[in-house]
Image (cartoon, grey):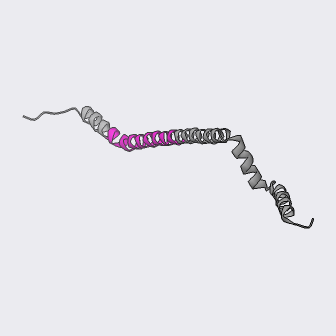
Amino acid sequence: MTLLVNTQITDAVTQSNVKVIAESPAFAMSSMYQTLAHSTGILFENAIAAQQQQNTLSLAASNQGVMQIYTVDTTAAAGATEKVAQTGVADNLTSLLTVLNAFNPNP
């Protein structure tokens, strides 16, 4: 027994199959573009997060440096400043001259 199918039905099924096959590359590319856009967005989010963490670390390092400057003893700072500037050389030479004059029997 042979079933006869209307040609309009076979044409509709064939065209549906062709439509699905023809649209597949476009859907695949659109899916690739969406994935690429999403990955790029995540990339930028990670870059911004890294910059924010770097700024936080920089502020913490600056804060530690200022805290160390403020905790230095004033006398130690004055001594260090004198050593760097060598402002006490004249005083030392004057003291040495006074001691040498004290040992000189003929003033």
Instruction: Tell whether 65 sits left or right of 90.
Output: left
Which quadrant of the rendered structure holds the C terminus?
A: bottom right
The magenta stretch spans residue 61: no
Q: Residue furthest right?
A: 107
Looking at the image, is 66 positioned above or below residue 106? above
The image shows residue 37 at horizontal and vertical percentages of 48, 41
Residue ID at (83%, 55%): 91
Which quadrant of the rendered structure holds the N terminus?
A: top left
Instruction: Tell whether 26 sits left or right of 16.
Output: right
Residue extent of the magenta highlight: 18-47
The image shows residue 104 at horizontal and vertical percentages of 87, 66
Instruction: Tell whether 24 sits left or right of 98.
Output: left
Q: Camera-side residue: 40 or 81?
A: 81
Q: Camera-side residue: 12 or 58?
A: 58
The image shows residue 99 at horizontal and vertical percentages of 82, 60
The magenta stretch spans residue 29: yes
Q: Camera-side residue: 31 or 48?
A: 48
The image shows residue 84 at horizontal and vertical percentages of 75, 55
Residue ID at (71%, 41%): 74
Q: Residue furthest front?
A: 105
Q: Camera-side residue: 72 or 57?
A: 72
Residue 106 occupies quadrant: bottom right
Residue ID at (16%, 33%): 4
Assign the magenta stretch its main secondary structure: helix
Tell me how many marks there are: 0
